[in-house]
Amino acid sequence: MADALILPHHGRMPVVAPSVFLAPTSIVIGDVEIGADSGIWFGSVLRGDVNEIRIGARTNIQDGTIIHVASRGQGTYVGDDVTVGHAAVLHACTVESSAFIGMKACVMDDVVVETQAMVAAGALVTPGKRVPRGQLWAGSPARHLRDLTEEELAFFPVSAAHYVELARSYAAPGGTAAAR
């Protein structure tokens, strides 16, 4: 089985905490830092070639997600305990700790997704928007759909913890891949 591809760009090598799970077929390039116990899943690409990408601890970047940056403007910043669903696109934005990004969501330049906010599956958050704490944004273009329930908010840390354990199971002896 192939390993993750970790590449320097203009002399900048990604910095990956030892407890991070990098799935085979994931690609991490350039000025990227990934915090402890995070998971970068199959087919994901983190391309820190023209600006920086920072991923916090216990964050999971699920299969097929693309994270990129803007050369004029900001990098991409994802906090701790964040769940990013399959095939999401994060571009030159900030996702604060304990937020949730749904599958196939697209979060554009200069967007801020606040702590305990959620971007729904398939949503397109257009440049410069702010998704406030406790809100669910959905649609294309995304807008405030409703406030999150207590049950939904309580699920965010459960999701993050689940993916930490799942990543560990892949990295463990007899698992599918080896941890980096």
Image (tube, grey):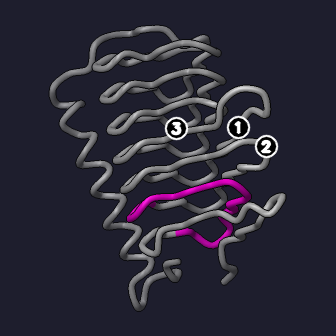
What residue is rendered at 39% in x and 84% in y?
172
The tag on residue 50 is 2
Rendering coords of residue 10 (x, y %): 84, 58
Determine whether 121 is above or below 50 in the image. above
User: Which one is closest to the eye, mark 2 or mark 1?
Assistant: 2
Residue at the spot of label 1 = 69
Mark 1: amino acid: Val
What residue is rendered at 51% in x and 51% in y?
61
Element marked by disc 1: loop
Image quarter (top left, top right, bottom left or bottom right) of the N terminus? bottom right
Rendering coords of residue 97 (x, y %): 36, 38
What residue is rendered at 37% in x and 34% in y?
99
Determine whether 62 is above or below 141 in the image. below
Left or right of residue 94, residue 155 in this image:
left
| Magenta-drawn segment | 22-38
Element marked by disc 3: loop
Rendering coords of residue 169 (x, y %): 37, 76
Separation of marks 2 and 3 at Cα, in angstroms: 26 Å
Left or right of residue 5, residue 122 in this image:
left
User: Which one is closest to the eye, mark 2 or mark 3?
Assistant: 2
Dot placed on the residue nearer the N-terminal end, 2 or 1: 2
Label 2: few (<14), some or many (≥20) within 10 Å? some
Quadrant position of residue 135: top left
Determine whether 7 is above or below 121 in the image. below
User: Which one is closest to the eye, mark 3 or mark 1?
Assistant: 1
The tag on residue 103 is 3
Label 3: few (<14), some or many (≥20) within 10 Å? many
